[in-house]
Amino acid sequence: MPSCFGALRPLVAGFVLSGLAFDRAPAGSLQACAVRDDVACEASRAAVVPSGALLALQRDNLKQLTAIRRETRRRLLAGEASSTDMAEVEARLAAARSSLYAAQAQYAAAKARYLAIIGASPAEVARTRTHARANRR
């Protein structure tokens, strides 16, 4: 009797669900498509979406600190702030830039992991899922 699991292989390979769920579903089954879509979307939620949200937060933080820097410079020129205040803002701005670069790297790594596991980019999966839903109606 052949094994249900077969050889080890990626869960999804280029929109083709592999493994137990696909082996048990009849060819062209909507159930197999639904499982494939769910796996791809959950993978996106688990890795790509949080990384993208963190990236957006880091960008917002950098914008706010840039505005604070402008205001502190204005206050320094008017004699209302000290050079220590300006140095502190500069240090925080440098840290925010560093955090933004780290978030960009994390986001790129999450998209690359998603592509390696799923076999398509999150945008391609979203387009395919939208197209599949439209065809089911």
Image (cartoon, rainbow, N blue to C red):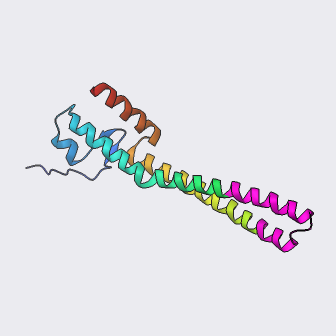
Q: Quadrant of residue 105?
A: bottom right
Q: Nearest the camera: 13 or 32? A: 32
Q: Please provide percent x and percent y for residue 15.
A: 34, 38
Q: Name the residue rendered at 30%, 50% in the picture.
A: 9
Residue found farthest to the bottom: 84
Q: Which residues are magenta?
A: 62-90
Q: Name the residue rendered at 21%, 38% in the picture.
A: 31
Q: Please provide percent x and percent y for residue 58.
A: 62, 57
Q: Is residue 130 visible in the rendered structure shown here?
A: yes
Q: Main secondary structure of the magenta part?
A: helix
Name the image quarter holding the C terminus: top left
Q: Quadrant of residue 95?
A: bottom right
Q: Is residue 118 left or right of residue 33?
A: right
* Figure disc tally: 0
Q: Nearest the camera: 133 or 39? A: 133
Q: Name the residue rendered at 37%, 29% in the picture.
A: 131
Q: Name the residue rendered at 41%, 55% in the picture.
A: 46
Vertical side of 26 occupied by 113: above or below: below
Assess whether residue 69 is covered by the magenta stretch.
yes
Q: Please provide percent x and percent y for residue 104.
A: 60, 54
Q: Nearest the camera: 22 or 94? A: 94
Q: Is residue 121 visible in the rendered structure shown here?
A: no
Q: Please provide percent x and percent y for residue 120.
A: 43, 40
